[in-house]
Image: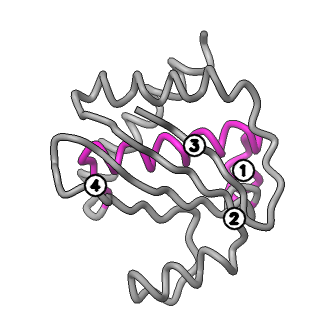
Amino acid sequence: MAIYFSAHEVKVGLKDRTRLKAFIADLFKREEQGLSNLQYVFCTDEYLLQINEEFLKHDTYTDIVTFELSPDPEVTEGEIYISIDRVRENAEQFEVTENYELHRVMFHGALHLCGYKDKTKKEEALMRQKEDEYLQLYFQQ
């Protein structure tokens, strides 16, 4: 199992990456979802907009795009693209730190790969509950 972080044309102040990787691996274990390979790519709004348009046919800015790449539903192999521009804007809007919002979005992407959706009000409520649960676990340690 491997978790990678990379940045495309942005700087990310991601602290304690070893601990974060272990926590994300534990999130998958808690959700009873196998994990083989996960790549987080931190990028600009423009870069993520291009991905959103090309692969999802959405002409909108977003904070995250998640791709499941494994043909085996039992084991995750995925890529998660996160707009640092959106993270900063969301942090300001929700009156939280950029670090907190970045982790929320990272856990959100992992939860998508574990099968959680957020298209309906009920799905979105469960997703928010799970995000909050993992944020509390991560930041209380």
* Mark 1 lies on residue: 91
- Crowd around label 2: few <14 · some 14–19 · many ≥20 (10 Å): many
Element assignment for label 2: strand
| First in residue order: circle 2 vs circle 3 | 3
Q: Quadrant of the C terminus?
A: top right
Between residue 81 and residue 97, name the one nearer to us. 81
Do tag 4 and tag 3 residues touch (Cβ < 8 Å)?
no
Q: Position of residue 73 (x, y in %)?
A: 16, 49
Amino acid under label 4? Lys
Do tag 2 and tag 3 residues touch (Cβ < 8 Å)?
no
Residue 72 placement, left or right of 57: left
| Number of the front mark, 3 or 1 | 3
Gap in Å between the C-alphas at discs 4 and 2? 23 Å
* Mark 2 lies on residue: 43
Gap in Å between the C-alphas at discs 1 and 4? 22 Å
| Number of the front mark, 1 or 2 | 2
Q: Quadrant of the N terminus?
A: top left
Amino acid under label 2? Cys
- Whether residue 124 is in magenta: the answer is no
* Mark 4 lies on residue: 117
* Mark 3 lies on residue: 4
Q: Main secondary structure of the magenta part?
A: helix
